[in-house]
């Protein structure tokens, strides 16, 4: 089995329990020292073979999979492997070569950066959408023509910009292009190595973004967040409003703010009913991300 494991944003305790368990059982671990701090390897068992992918090509990595068909192999990717993770080409290889694989999600650096900022990124009436994107860099041919930063900025929603700290002037110019819904005062944040021991945060505005990125002197492991959700106070969410009802809760009585469980309320975990327990198992099975393959 080849396990593509999300290492999380960097802190060794922000990997999932499942990811840590795969590391602890792995015979071979391939990790990217350029993106994942070494501390995460504390989850590996003594005696496992640990290989750094930072000087390897895709072919080198696939060669290791090929040479170790019986090994429990972990390919550790930073954050969540589904976001700029370069896993698809490896998954395609697994499918073509009839090798079993699984993907174990991770905490993306976006979540870690938002946590550090102490902000929700989807605030009612302010922004209900988050765009995850990048400035086209040396791999600009990868960027579909219809996906421009200026085009996304026209929506004025929260934007998370990966892989772009080496082009701060381009980044700022595109976010302030004529069709943009942002302006010079739109809040922005630069989060360097979110969750690492030397994490840094710069809260700024779009007008100062480029110079503040340059002042960090950082080009890698930098996430830029932009949008009014970073500072504005929006409406409270409907979900927990006494005036709102949903599947598990009835609208509160007039003059009261106390929640009223509906008949669909979930059973208390301490004393699950038989039917509730069956529902829970069914839900778990439906949500499970099981292995693929052979
Ligand atoms: C190849 S992408 C991988 C993204 C990763 N899969 C994720 O979910 O965060 C690398 C980029 O992610 C961002 N990044 C990854 N880890 C980060 C961290 N701990 N703090 C800030 N940015 C990070 C940076 O923009 C970096 O250039």
Image: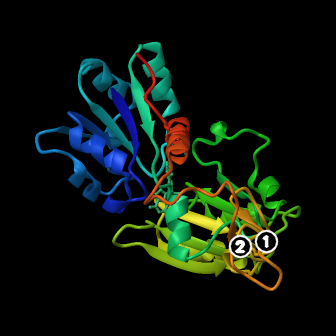
The residue positioned 45% from the left and 67% from the top of the image is 194
Res. 187 in view: yes
The image position of residue 244, as x and y in percent, is 80, 68
The residue positioned 56% from the left and 71% from the top of the image is 190
The residue positioned 72% from the left and 38% from the top of the image is 144
The C terminus - image quarter? top left
The answer to whether 179 appears left or right of 8 in the picture is right
Q: Is residue 142 above or below residue 182?
A: above
The answer to whether 56 appears left or right of 164 in the picture is left
Q: Is residue 143 above or below residue 72?
A: below
The image position of residue 119, as x and y in percent, is 61, 74
Q: Counting other residues with Cα less than 10 Å from the Cα at mark 2, is it few (<14), some (14-19), or many (20 or more)?
A: many
The answer to whether 43 appears left or right of 257 in the picture is left
Q: Do the numbered discs 2 and 1 sit on residues whose CB atoms are within 8 Å?
A: yes
Task: Please name the residue that numbered disc 1 is placed on.
Answer: 126
Marks 2 and 1, how far apart at CA: 6 Å
SS for dot 1: loop
Q: Counting other residues with Cα less than 10 Å from the Cα at mark 1, is it few (<14), some (14-19), or many (20 or more)?
A: many
Foreground residue among 73 and 240:
240
The image position of residue 26, as x and y in percent, is 23, 36
The N terminus - image quarter? top left
Q: Quadrant of residue 15?
A: bottom left
Q: Residue furthest bottom?
A: 255
Task: Please name the residue that numbered disc 2 is placed on.
Answer: 229
């Amino acid at each position: 089995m080849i396990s593509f494991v999300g290492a999380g944003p960097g802190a060794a305790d922000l990997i999932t329990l499942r990811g840590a368990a795969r590391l602890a059982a792995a015979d071979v671990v391939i990790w990217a020292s350029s993106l994942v701090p070494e501390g995460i390897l504390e989850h590996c068992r003594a005696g496992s073979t640990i290989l750094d992918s930072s000087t390897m090509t895709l072919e080198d990595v696939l060669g290791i999979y090929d040479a170790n068909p019986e090994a429990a192999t972990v390919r550790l990717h930073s954050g969540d492997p589904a976001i700029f993770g370069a896993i698809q080409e490896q998954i395609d290889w697994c499918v073509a070569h009839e090798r079993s694989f699984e993907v174990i999600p991770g905490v993306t650096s976006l979540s870690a950066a938002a946590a550090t900022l102490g902000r929700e990124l989807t605030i009612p009436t302010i922004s209900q959408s988050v765009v995850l994107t990048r400035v086209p860099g040396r791999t600009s041919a990868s960027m579909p023509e219809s996906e421009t930063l200026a085009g996304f900025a026209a929506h004025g929603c929260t934007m998370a910009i990966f892989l772009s700290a080496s082009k701060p002037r381009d980044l700022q110019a595109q976010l302030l292009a004529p069709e943009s819904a942002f302006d010079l005062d739109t809040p922005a944040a630069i989060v360097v190595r979110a969750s690492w021991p030397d994490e840094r945060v710069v809260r700024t505005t779009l007008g100062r973004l480029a110079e503040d990125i340059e002042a960090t002197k950082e080009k890698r492991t930098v996430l830029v967040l932009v949008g009014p959700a970073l500072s504005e106070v929006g409406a409270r969410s409907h979900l927990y409003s006494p005036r709102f009802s949903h599947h598990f809760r009835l609208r509160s009585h007039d003059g009261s703010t106390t929640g009223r469980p509906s008949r669909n309320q979930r059973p208390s975990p301490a004393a699950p009913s038989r039917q509730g327990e069956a529902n829970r198992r069914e839900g778990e099975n439906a949500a499970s991300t099981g292995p693929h393959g052979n």
